[in-house]
Amino acid sequence: MSNVKSKKLSLTQQEYKEFAKVRVPNRPVLTNCIRAFIAGGIICTIGQGVQWMFMTYFGFTEVTAGNPTVAVLIMLSVLLTGLGVYDHIAQWAGAGSAVPVTGFANTVASAAIEHRTEGYVLGVGGNMFKLAGPVIAYGVFSAFIVALVKITVQALGGI
């Protein structure tokens, strides 16, 4: 990109650059931030409500209610993706729907739905982990490194 700036533009290129600059729509950054904040907040509030439900009605503790809460949010996200609703939410919310675990589940489910015509193994199985695979591998590797550090610190007497 730096070569483009240092290079002299012809008259036609300069005219086109000015022409394009005038016609590029302004991005509503503040509106997008507010929408992302609202959508992410609603998703997190739903998650908090599900966690509260597990603690109140099923006798989970605050620590043990986390895993089933995440599972419910993932299932809801996959269900809404399959029904085509999550795409509309994501279109309105932007990054607010992509950041929580529901956005990750939506990505995996939408890739699986998109490639289902190619078969279950090569289509669904092969393509749904294009994004999820590196994320899962990084998570497992990071957990392994953290566990090694913890074990080493404990073996050395808790430095």
Image (spheres, helix red, strand yellow):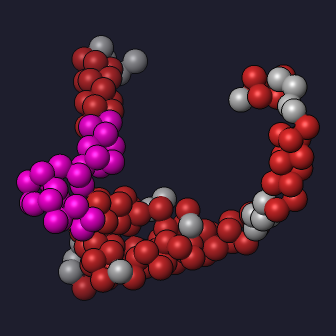
Q: Which residue is outermost to the top?
A: 156
Residue 105, image x, y percentages: 32, 63
* Residue 24 placement, left or right of 152: right
Image quadrant containing the N terminus? top right
Task: Verify whether residue 24 appears in magenta.
Answer: no
Q: Is residue 17 visible?
A: yes
* Residue 117 placement, left or right of 19: left
Foreground pick, 119 / 67? 119
Task: Verify whether residue 125 appears in magenta.
Answer: yes
Q: Which residue is outermost to the front?
A: 12
Residue 35, image x, y percentages: 64, 73
Q: Main secondary structure of the magenta part?
A: helix
Answer above or below: position of 7 versus 23.
above
Residue 135, image x, y percentages: 33, 43
Residue depicted at 24% across the width and 68% down the height? 113
Q: In the rendered structure, which segment of residues is drawn in magenta?
A: 113-138
Residue depicted at 28% across the width and 72% down the height? 78
Answer above or below: position of 81 versus 149.
below
Residue depicted at 23% across the width and 52% down the height? 127
